[in-house]
Amino acid sequence: MKLGMVIKTSRCIGCDACTVSCKTFNKLGPNVVYRKVHKFEVGEYPSAKRRSIPTLCNHCENAACEKVCPTGATYKDEKGRVQVDQDKCIGCRMCIGACPYGARTFNWGPQESYWPATDEPSVIDEAVAGSHRVGAVEKCTMCKDRTDNGLDPLCVHNCPARALVFGDLDDPESEVAKLVGTGKTYTLLPEKGTLPQVHYMD
Amino acid sequence: MEKTSSKFKALCAILALIAAAGVATWIYQLMGGLAVTGMSDGTSWGLYITGFMFFVGLSAGGLIVASSASVFHVTEYKKVALPAVILSTVCICCAGLSIFIDLGSIQNVWRMFVGLNFLSPLAWDLIVISLYLIINIIYLVMMTSKNPETQGKVAIVSRFALPVAILVHSVTAWIFGLEIARDGWYTALMAPLFVVSAMDSGLALLLLALAGLQKAGWFTIDKKLFASLAGLLATCVAIDGYLVGCEALTMAYPGAEGASMLAIMTTGATAPFFWFEVIVGILIPFCILVFAKNRQRRGLVCVASACVVAGVLCKRLWVLLTSFVGFAVPTPLGTIGGAEVWEMTIGYAPTWPEYVIVAGVVALGALAFVVLARKLLPAAPKSAKDLAQEALDGIVPEGAVS
């Protein structure tokens, strides 16, 4: 099994719903994201357009981050997703240097509050604090809890424009495998040889 | 004698104080997390890793000189082997310490002993640095031994010491040089570059240390040997400059990815460090040391050595930081990241805890060096208690210092 994604950039409306879904599902604090939507101005006035491209962990087949991890905290799981075992991470940040996509984040210190001016700890801040360990590296898990149960990752589920397609690249009947089979998809930085499992197409 | 002793005590006290401040700040960092540093996801390594690279390099000079004495039968180097190995041991301990300081989850380090991933360059580093430290300690024990048979065995250890010394710098280089993600790091030249930087900064520090020991009256080094080591330093500095030149030309020529990295180094965010290294770290010391007459002048050699050490420190900084500054992911719609984004939104400036902790590591290293030198060097002044214990044990004692 090789779970992966196809991102149709022409369908992306740049609404950031995926980023927000991800932040709520993974209980991420302020300034922490596992995935982003990058916005670009393409073309010249008067025919300039605003285009967006979402990026996330590419769950590479030949993952550079996995190789350099000294304790094996970063690993490819049985479904082809790249995961970080928080209990094994020593916080050396080799993987952050090794990732060509900048997909990893580090818990530099205790999570900041979303409401720094208020005294009472909010429910959200407590949830955030309880789900991250200071000194460990984190990243997109491809919504492990959801995808283990046959659901789509929340970013895919919540995309209003259906720009994100999720599935098993090893299953020839899946939509992702069919889209990749058309030959119209591409990956980011293919010359790095990391073989991303997140593909893009227009 | 009495005066030297009080001066020595004052020096130790100052160094101990700085080291204690470093330890206190480290505890503060352990409580607050690495958020107290200037590092971020965009610049995930900073002053600590620079210190690590720098100290690994500084430890080279000592062991390479000491083991060359036996391997290549350069008998005159044997005279400085003992202070050289003391310096080497201290520096490699500082390097190891720097890595531990940089770790986010030091409580999980035991995982490296139960589930080491042998594909990771950091795992190789753990193995090779441990080996290197063990060899240094064996050396120290053998060289200070009063048994003449043990002295003879030094030659055997040297045959292992030299390749391990080369490997320890190569492996440190591979932490960076094998990461295809970073254009500035991913080059086969990284390992030779680290080896030669280690040799020139290590030799330069050794020369400074020898001059210092001589001034303190703990050690005498004859002029000819000092000049000969200075000549070796000139050669290493020249090779270092040559390799930097090769790397720069290879980056510039295709006018592609590498050229943008080179632009950051020569005109961008890391340019001050690059040009400092080229001018102060390579050109000036080489122009001083290339003339045999200058190599006879101890003061001038010390100035050149200080330039080399400072230059190599700057080199560590530009090697490390340029790849963070230039990090970019091109997409068909546009490029994500890049030098401008780094300078405007990410950046890196060490915070006071970083400076204090690094100063603490340096002070601890200096303290360990002066204490060990006083204990182990035959000409160093000793307290009556030490001499009595030495006479009793027949070996160099361990224990409290004056």
Image (cartoon, grey):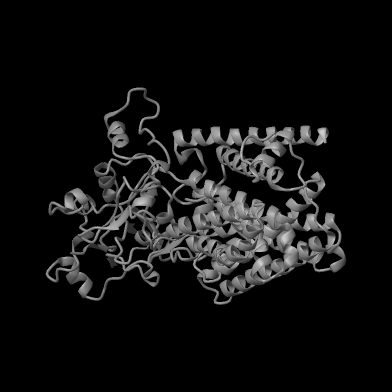
Q: From this viewpoint, is residue B249 visible?
A: yes
In this view, the residue in front, A195 or B292, is: B292
Residue B87: image x %, image y %?
Answer: 66, 51
Residue occupying image coordinates x 33% and y 63%: A63
Task: Please give left or right for residue B198 compared with residue A130 in the image.
Answer: right
Task: Please give left or right for residue A4 compared with residue B346 in the image.
Answer: left
Q: Quadrant of residue B108?
A: top left
Q: Is B6 rendered above or below residue B148?
A: above
In this view, the residue in front, B332 or B385, is: B385
Residue occupying image coordinates x 17% and y 71%: A178
Residue B271: image x %, image y %?
Answer: 64, 58
Q: Quadrant of residue B200?
A: bottom right
Q: Count all numbered tags in the image, as a single digit.
A: 0
For the N terminus of chain B, give its image quadrant.
top right
Q: From this viewpoint, is residue B271 visible?
A: no
For the C terminus of chain B, give its image quadrant.
top right
Residue occupying image coordinates x 17% and y 50%: A146
Residue B27: image x %, image y %?
Answer: 50, 34
In this view, the residue in front, B56 or B229, is: B229
Q: Residue furthest top?
A: A119
In this view, the residue in front, B15 or B134, is: B134
Task: Please give left or right for residue B18 compared with residue B160 in the image.
Answer: right
Q: Is B116 rendered above or below residue B31?
A: below
Residue B305: image x %, image y %?
Answer: 75, 57
